[in-house]
Amino acid sequence: MSFTVAIDGPAAAGKGTIAKGVAAHFGFAHLDTGLLYRAVGRQTLDGTDAIAAAQALTADELEQGDLRTADIAQAASKVAVIPEVRAALVDFQRAFARRAGGAVLDGRDIGTVICPEAEIKLFVTASAEVRAERRYLELKAKGSDVTQEQVLADVRERDARDAERITAPMKPAEDAVRLDTSDLSIEAALERAVALIESKR
Ligand code: C5P
């Protein structure tokens, strides 16, 4: 039997950590759907057409090199506005969501478009400043020389592009539970998510 947990929200709100923790706790498979858009975005930086890259994308490409850089994040949010790119990635995500044993998918449109039937929907948010600080510390730990101001500008630009696009904009599903992690440790946020899922299983 399949059981799907949909986790949406803006960059660096804590979705990824919560999704990984939930998957580990319940033994569910986890798909970070941002990696699909990042893998397509990375290819456009080499001059490949975005729609062609999305249509030819394979699971192997999600593990190619470091896709979690600031340049690839920007490229990903640009290809993510193209309806044909989004359409090409739907089947892979839905098949993953329906796998036996349970699945957690995190992204921007999982509860609204990819898995409107998900058993649990979470919308994880935090203030732009808190998110920029978290992302800045992550990038710095990886040796990047970005400044916190650059990261905040980047987070705001991506938020606006993700929320304002016509196709599958980032927004909470009507039946999503909102979790604001601005003043919550990731451990506390994960505990709340686990308790919520336990109550619905
Ligand atoms: O979550 P992450 O920062 O890796 O996502 C990179 C970009 O991919 C986002 O800014 C967004 O534009 C896009 N994305 C999306 N829909 C998803 C996941 C990511 O549009 N489900």
Image (cartoon, grey):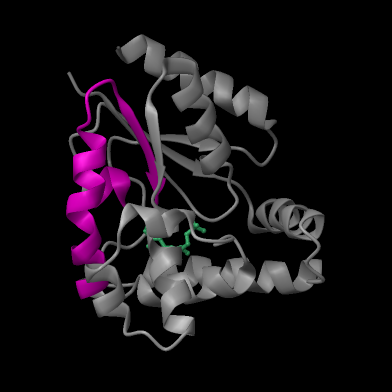
Count of labels shown?
0
Q: Main secondary structure of the magenta part?
A: helix
Magenta segment: does it hold 107? yes
Judge from the rendering whether residue 185 lies leftward or rightward of residue 58; answer left or right.
right
Q: Vertically, is 39 above or below 2? A: below
Judge from the rendering whether residue 88 lies leftward or rightward of residue 197; answer left or right.
left
Task: Depth check: give the residue in front, 4 or 62.
Answer: 62
Task: Identify the image quadrant of residue 135.
Answer: bottom right
Task: Depth check: give the residue in front, 143 or 110.
Answer: 143
The residue depicted at 47 percent of the width and 54 percent of the height is 63
Q: Vertically, is 10 above or below 29? A: below
**Which residue range is magenta in the image?**
84-113
The residue depicted at 78 percent of the width and 67 percent of the height is 144
- Across and down, in percent, residue 180 comes to 57, 38
Task: Identify the image quadrant of residue 118.
Answer: top left
The residue depicted at 28 percent of the width and 20 percent of the height is 101
- Across and down, in percent, residue 122 comes to 40, 35
The residue depicted at 26 percent of the width and 39 percent of the height is 96
Does any portion of residue 100 appear in the rendered image?
A: yes
Task: Depth check: give the residue in front, 192 or 135.
Answer: 135
Task: Identify the image quadrant of residue 183.
Answer: top right
- Across and down, in percent, residue 129 comes to 71, 57
Magenta segment: does it hold 144? no
Q: Quadrant of the C terminus?
A: top left
